[in-house]
Amino acid sequence: MSGERTGGCLCGAVRYVAALDAEHQHLHACHCTMCRRVSGGVAFSVMVPAAAMRVNGAEHVTTYASSDWAARSFCARCGSGLWYRLTQPDAATADYYLSAGTLDDPNGLPLTREIYIDTKPDGFAFAGDHSRLTGAEFEASLQANPEE
């Protein structure tokens, strides 16, 4: 099922419309230390190509370069984490990895991938048959496929 997903921050200053095609109708889960600190737990995201994303209230978005390869954006008014984007090779055309918690309706998006499973807390165990990568495996995939 293809279609538009809407979402935004807690205070409503930032709203977005993301056009998801069939290829991007799924969730990723990240267990890295940064995602856990930003989200308060596991970070669930959905990938949206830059050309398929419209943001209203961009003047309220603040971006923090959290690593050598990604930057995280949040609402400057309420602090809601909105998305992260890869910074290599060109942040202007990088895909969005939307925080699934900001979607108005996150239903119908199955979990297909977990990353940084080597830093996953013991109590976080997701059922199902999906890709599970260590931090080293995920970072190697970025080098092999910068669009990941």
Image (cartoon, rainbow, N blue to C red):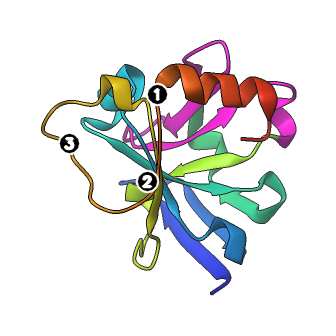
Residue 39 placement (x, y as % from top left) = 32, 37
Task: Kindly report the distance in space between the C-alpha atoms of the residues bearing marks 1 and 3.
Answer: 15 Å
Is 91 a magenta residue? yes
Which residue is the site of mark 3?
124
Task: Kindly report the distance in space between the C-alpha atoms of the residues bearing marks 2 and 3.
Answer: 25 Å
Which residue is the site of mark 2?
9
The secondary structure type at the circle numbered 3 is loop
Q: Outermost residue toward the top?
A: 68
Tell me where residue 107 sits by quadrant: bottom left
Residue 105 placement (x, y as % from top left) = 42, 76
Q: Count the numbered circles shown.
A: 3
Tell me where residue 91 sits by quadrant: top right
Residue stretch in magenta: 64-93
Q: Which badge, 2 or 3, comes first in the chain's sequence?
A: 2
The secondary structure type at the circle numbered 1 is loop
Q: Which badge, 2 or 1, comes first in the chain's sequence?
A: 2
Q: Residue at x 53, y 65 (%)?
A: 26
Q: Are marks 2 and 1 in contact (CB under 8 Å)?
A: no
The amino acid beneath tag 1 is: Thr
The crowd level at tag 3 (other Cα within 10 Å; few <14, some 14-19, many 20+) is few
What numbered label is drawn on residue 134? 1
Q: Viewer-proximal residue, 8 or 145?
A: 145
Residue 54 placement (x, y as % from top left) = 73, 62
Q: Nearer the viewer, mark 1 or mark 3?
A: 1
Task: Kindly report the distance in space between the C-alpha atoms of the residues bearing marks 2 and 1.
Answer: 30 Å
The amino acid beneath tag 3 is: Phe
- In-image side of 13 versus 67 (left or right): left
Q: Outermost residue toward the front?
A: 129
Residue 65 placement (x, y as % from top left) = 61, 18
